[in-house]
């Protein structure tokens, strides 16, 4: 091989590293799935609550409301990141003092029938089943 051919091959090789270094190569999936990495709960009708907070020690939300006839509690599940492929949630609960429904994928409606404590879990439906636990305490006035 001639020296000029070897030099040309070496030059192209070095130039390719420089070009890739400057412009980079990005690999992007065509249908990339973005999973939910966090869920937070916020009241929609905050006037129904006496108090609400996230208890860091127990890793759960705590909501307190006073019982009255036809008490309806509404919460919103805020899913992060906002561009999650499937940002819908479902609710898991075992209670005789309330019925809980999810509408529009993120709005949680709790129809309270009596006083007491209602434990429930909000779970992502994207396949990872990310779970946030909460307790609603319904007190008699």
Image: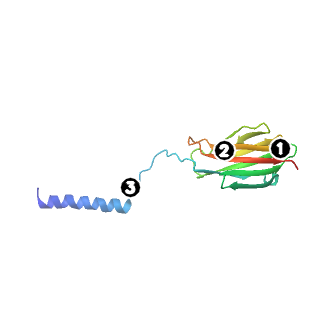
* Mark with earlier residue (1, 3): 3
Res. 115 mark: 1
Secondary structure at badge 2 equals: strand
Res. 78 mark: none
Which quarter of the picture shows residue 121? top right
Q: Is residue 128 above or below residue 11?
A: above
* Residue identified by numbered label 2: 122
* Mark with earlier residue (2, 1): 1
Residue shown at 22% from the left, 62% from the top:
11
Q: CA distance from mark 2 to mark 1?
A: 21 Å
* Residue identified by numbered label 3: 25
| For discs 2 and 1, the disc positioned in front in the rendered view | 1
Tag 2 and tag 3, C-beta contact below 8 Å: no
> Furthest residue to the left?
2
The x and y percentages for residue 95 are 75, 38
| Residue 44 shows in this picture | no
């Amino acid at each position: 091989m001639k020296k000029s051919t070897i030099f040309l091959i070496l030059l192209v090789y070095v130039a390719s590293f420089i070009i890739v270094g400057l412009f980079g190569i990005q690999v992007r999936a065509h249908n990339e799935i973005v999973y939910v990495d966090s869920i937070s709960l916020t009241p929609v009708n905050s006037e129904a609550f006496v108090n609400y907070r996230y208890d860091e020690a127990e890793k759960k939300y705590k909501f307190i409301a006073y019982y009255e006839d036809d008490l309806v509690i509404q919460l919103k599940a805020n899913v992060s990141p906002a561009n999650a492929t499937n940002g819908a949630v479902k609710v898991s609960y075992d209670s005789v003092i309330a019925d809980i429904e999810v509408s529009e994928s993120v709005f949680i409606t709790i129809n309270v029938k009596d006083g007491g404590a209602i434990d429930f879990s909000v779970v992502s439906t994207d396949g990872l089943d990310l779970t946030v636990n909460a307790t609603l305490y319904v007190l008699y006035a």
